[in-house]
């Protein structure tokens, strides 16, 4: 089931902050707690405030995958991050069998950067980005131009002296 969406930029920012990583034992300890039981341990739960996350976001161009996390130690690689604080819990979605025209309308009307594609059980099956939709639009325009050129050439051919079609 769909829980939420997190951007690659936010993930990269979080990976650059090993101070928010926690071990499996630390995670199990905080999961067993309720707000009334041991609130001092819950307060120690590591997360990055939004203002800091915003400052940590990498600038464009984004680092290549092999450059991401190169400052992490092996110990860091065995730790976890609570990403629930950073999830967009109600992302814009579209069903997998919806039309491309509907997706295009959603991008234009809502000013989206990405659109999550889901199946009937609300499981993510893909994502459409603004960039991909722009490429699709360019391909559509090229096809339209080719169709017009083909139609023009057919009309020109039909107007050629001495040409008789089957309908004449």
Image: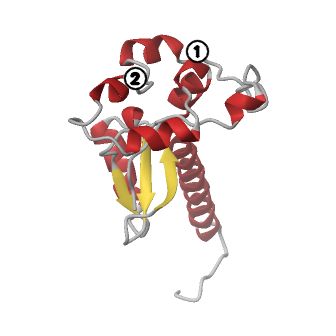
| Image mark for residue 128 | none
| Image mark for residue 44 | 2
Asked if residue 17 can be seen in this view, the reply is: no
Image quadrant in which you'd find residue 163: bottom right
- What is the crowding at mark 1: few (fewer than 14 residues within 10 Å), some, or many (at least 20)? few
| Residue that badge 1 annotates | 59
Which residue is nearer to you in this view: 97 or 68?
A: 68
> Looking at the picture, how far across and down is residue 47, in whole percent?
43, 24
SS under mark 1: loop
- What is the crowding at mark 2: few (fewer than 14 residues within 10 Å), some, or many (at least 20)? few
> Looking at the picture, how far across and down is residue 86, in whole percent?
40, 32
* In this picture, residue 51 sits left or right of residue 69: left
Which residue is nearer to you in this view: 116 or 167?
A: 116
SS under mark 2: loop
Instruction: Answer above or below: position of 128 versus 76.
Output: below
The residue drawn where x is 45% and y is 24% is: 46
The residue drawn where x is 50% and y is 51% is: 127
């Amino acid at each position: 089931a769909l829980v939420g969406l997190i951007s690659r930029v936010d993930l990269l920012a979080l990976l650059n902050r090993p101070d928010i990583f926690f071990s499996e034992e630390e995670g199990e300890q905080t999961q067993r707690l309720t707000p009334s039981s041991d609130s001092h341990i819950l307060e120690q739960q590591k997360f990055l405030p939004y203002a800091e996350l915003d400052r940590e976001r990498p600038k464009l161009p984004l680092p290549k995958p092999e450059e991401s996390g190169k400052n992490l130690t092996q110990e860091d690689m065995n730790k976890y991050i609570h990403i629930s604080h950073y999830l967009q819990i109600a992302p814009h979605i579209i069903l997998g069998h919806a039309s491309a025209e509907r997706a295009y309308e959603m991008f234009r009307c809502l000013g989206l950067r990405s659109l999550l594609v889901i199946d009937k059980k609300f499981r993510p099956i893909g994502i459409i980005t603004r960039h991909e939709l722009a490429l699709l639009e360019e391909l559509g325009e090229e096809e339209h131009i080719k169709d017009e050129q083909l139609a023009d050439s057919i009309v020109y051919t039909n107007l050629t002296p001495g040409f008789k079609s089957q309908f004449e």
